[in-house]
Amino acid sequence: MSSGAFVTAEQAVADTRRWLERAVIGLNLCPFAKAVHVKGRIHYATYLPAEHDDLLDALLAEARQLVALDATERDTTLLIAPSALSDFLDFNDFTARAERRLAKAGFDGVLQLASFHPQFQFGGTEPDDIGNATNRAPYPTLHLLREESVDRAVEAFPDAEEIFGRNIDTLETLGPEGWAALDVGPGSTPT
């Protein structure tokens, strides 16, 4: 978190759930999120240190725990790092290293890694481009998804490749004021 304020694990999870419910599910940015949320199959994990020295180890531990459980118990994991990697470029570099490490650890073809960050910016966009909000979460977040679950979701949603474009249209219609009104930033949920 760029303000330097300490965020508890409970606050980080509450803020992330609020973002998931109001933005990701509420705006239907991910048509697959609602089912796993309603069924309680999302695991929220936190990494609280400001330094990211052990974040990769934490991610690998979460990956091992995820694949050790049946998808009916835990389908996906969000690893929230509220105090680490506040700079988006550092986070982006870290995410690339994390993907390589997951593959090296044998998770290639088993898990996918998605990333979310408060300052997320797609290549070729301006920082204030509303389309970047599709990947903006309250805190730096690494999302582990099961490949099998992604494959099933894509089969159930025949136009999956159109989701991104639809999301951009939704956010452009909503606009920056509408996004701000969702109140899905850090500290938006009382502890």
Image (spheres, grey):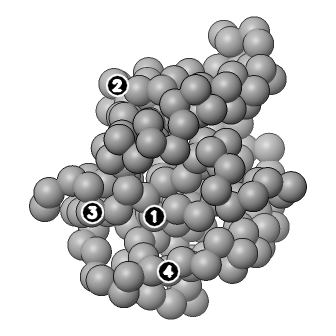
The x and y percentages for residue 113 are: 68, 52
Tell me whether the residue at label 3 lies in contact with that at label 2, contact meaning CB atoms closer than 8 angstroms: no
Query: Marks 4 and 3, how far apart in space?
Result: 16 Å
Assess disc 2: are there few (<14), some (14-19) or many (≥20) residues with their C-alpha within 10 Å of its C-alpha: few
User: At x 52% / y 31%, what residue is drawn?
Assistant: 174
| Mark 2: amino acid | Lys
Note whether 77 is above or below 103 in the view shown.
above
Question: Which type of secondary structure does the marked residue at label 1 adopt?
Answer: loop
Q: Which residue is mark 3?
A: 187
Query: Marks 3 and 2, how far apart in space?
Result: 26 Å
Label 4 vs 2, first from the N-terminus:
2
Label 1 vs 2, first from the N-terminus:
2
Residue 63 shows in the view = no
Give the foreground label among 4 and 2: 4
Q: Is residue 81 left or right of residue 125?
A: left
Q: Which residue is mark 1?
A: 139
